[in-house]
Image (cartoon, helix red, strand yellow):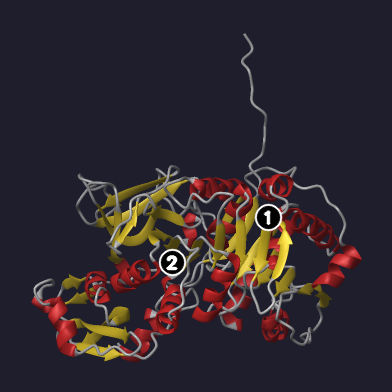
Amino acid sequence: MIPGAMQPYALTLDKFIDHAAKWHGATEVVTGGDAPARIGYAALRERANRLSGAFAELGLRPGDHLATLAWNSQAHMECWYGAMGIGVVCHTLNPRLSVAHLAVMIQQAEDRVLAVSPGLASLVQELVEQCPTIEHVVLLDEPGMDHPAPVVPRATLWAYEDLLDTHGTVMPWGGFDETSPAGLCFTSGTTGAPKGVTYTHRSNYLETVHLLQADVIGMTSRDVVMVAVPMFHANGWGLAFAGPAVGAKLVLPGRNQDGASLTRLINQEGVTIAVGVPTVWLGLIDHVEATGEELPSLRRVVLGGSSVPQALMDRIEQRLGVVVQTSWGMTELSPLGTISPASEPVRDATRSGRPPIGVDLRLTDNTGLPLSSQRGAEGCLWVRGASVVERYYGQTEPVTDAEGWFDTGDLATIDATGNLRITGRAKDLIKSGGEWINPGEIEAIVGALPGVALVAVIGRAHPKWGERPVLVVEPRQGAEVSDDMLVGALKGRIANWWMPDAIVRLSAMPLAMTGKIDKIRLRAEHG
């Protein structure tokens, strides 16, 4: 007997926007600003497809790299699909990085075309001078961003609409292997030189399926999703794929992510789900508490990218009356690792939820041997799955063990119900008198105090003990946070010798390019 067969339907990312254009063509993608730009999925798909023809005319071929240095916008999303649809790899760059850092990444990736938001044009001249592989610069079209064109040495400068009008032609999409590279994102480099993570069409397709599970984000065509996480952070957590996959309306804030701008956009567009890093929502909650404004359409807030202070989670839930979903992930995980289900609201900000199908977790000791019990004990966290890195860009050796497990560098516990709790980063541990102090435990306690906005614990060199902990806090606006209050919260909950030797108050906590607290800078200035 000859067995039956299924169609070889490649899991490539053009399928998402094709689906949205055919079945949800009028559903909008909105780019924020004083006069928001609006476009339906059908029209966006048509423009992105013609952009593919323009990219081909500029010489881009499958496997080549298009770099984007841009905020969340319609034009940026069109670049994604225009590049990925013809097998070109979209290399997303973080505009908050220095020219030196960006140049290293561009040189390593050998990017040939650079698409840039108009407000970032000042970076272009220096980048082109340092990156000889860049042949063309495309100045994107974004609402409310009318800036003079940059002076570009050597490379050809294109205005976005001029490029579309001059060279935009219809192109066939797909036709390549689903394991072909689709995106490139470099890690933040907090533990050394930034490392490139290559996402394939298949890995991003499956990551999107993870997001759409009911216990993950589970958006539907009835939702309006604000993507406040930057599209240059691990492909914007895959939301620009998940939205079209189900026909959800997408709201892209652009560069302005202050509390007032986000509040206005949420109410104007009827946002139901908002996604971003904790510092974004700190600005929003400060604004609504100060102004008394309401956000009646908002039902869920998804937090990720860094640990969430308990006090911030409480303020969001109580003031806005929404469900807060905490999550954990990494660039190397595409980025989702775990998330707390919306159907099981938790009041503990340290819980990061459970993994979706397709992601597996394992705890080991510091030699890599699995713990005999995977519940209730602290260990080193390893991950494997279809959307987990195997090797970094440009490297020949895998970063996984023989069984495919990737060492995240995090310390964690998993409780009896399978919920993950990140207890710290191995690199952040403070060694005092030959014993380890875990900053994460101290940060969780202090972060629960109502008067604390942000908190960090760093190590400071000590002549006798080697290192001693220093507590750094950013008080909430108008709040008084005394030493006695901070020390009192810790007494009886941590060992006496874990007690910080010093307390530093900052009016604004330094943030790294990803929106996380910049511990490297804190150590340099207060360590």
Q: Residue at x 79, y 87 (%)?
A: 151
* Residue at 28% from the left image edge and 61% from the top image edge: 347
**Can you give x and y, in whole percent of width and height, for residue 372 in the image?**
20, 44
Examine the rendered structure and indicate whether residue 388 appears above or below residue 297: above
Of residues 456 and 406, which is closer to you in this image? 456
Q: At numbered mark 1, what does the secondary structure look like: helix, strand or loop?
A: loop
Q: Residues within 10 Å of mark 2 (few under 14, many from 20)?
A: many
Instruction: Return the residue nearer the eye: 225 or 140.
Output: 225
User: Disc 1 marks which residue?
Assistant: 27
Query: How dense is the environment of label 1, judged by Cα within 10 Å: few (below 14), some, or many (20 and up)?
Result: many
Of the numbered discs 2 and 1, the one sitting upstream in the chain is 1
Q: Looking at numbered disc 2 in the image, what kind of residue is underneath it?
A: Gly
Alpha carbon of mark 2 to alpha carbon of mark 1: how far?
Answer: 28 Å
Q: Nearer the viewer, residue 240 or 137?
A: 240
Using the image, determine if residue 272 lies above or below residue 462. above
Which residue sits at x=85%, y=66%? 164
Assign the N terminus to one quadrant of the image.
Answer: top right
Residue 500, visible in the rendered structure: no
Can residue 229 be seen?
A: yes
Horizontally, residue 490 falls left or right of residue 429, namely: left
Foreground mark, 2 or 1, reads 1
Position of the C terminus, as image quadrant, is bottom left
Image position of 119 (left or right of 152): left
Q: Mark 1: which amino acid?
A: Thr
* 393 with respect to 420 (left or right): right
| In the image, residue 67 above or below residue 153 | above
Q: Which residue is mark 2?
A: 305
Q: Secondary structure at mark 2?
A: loop
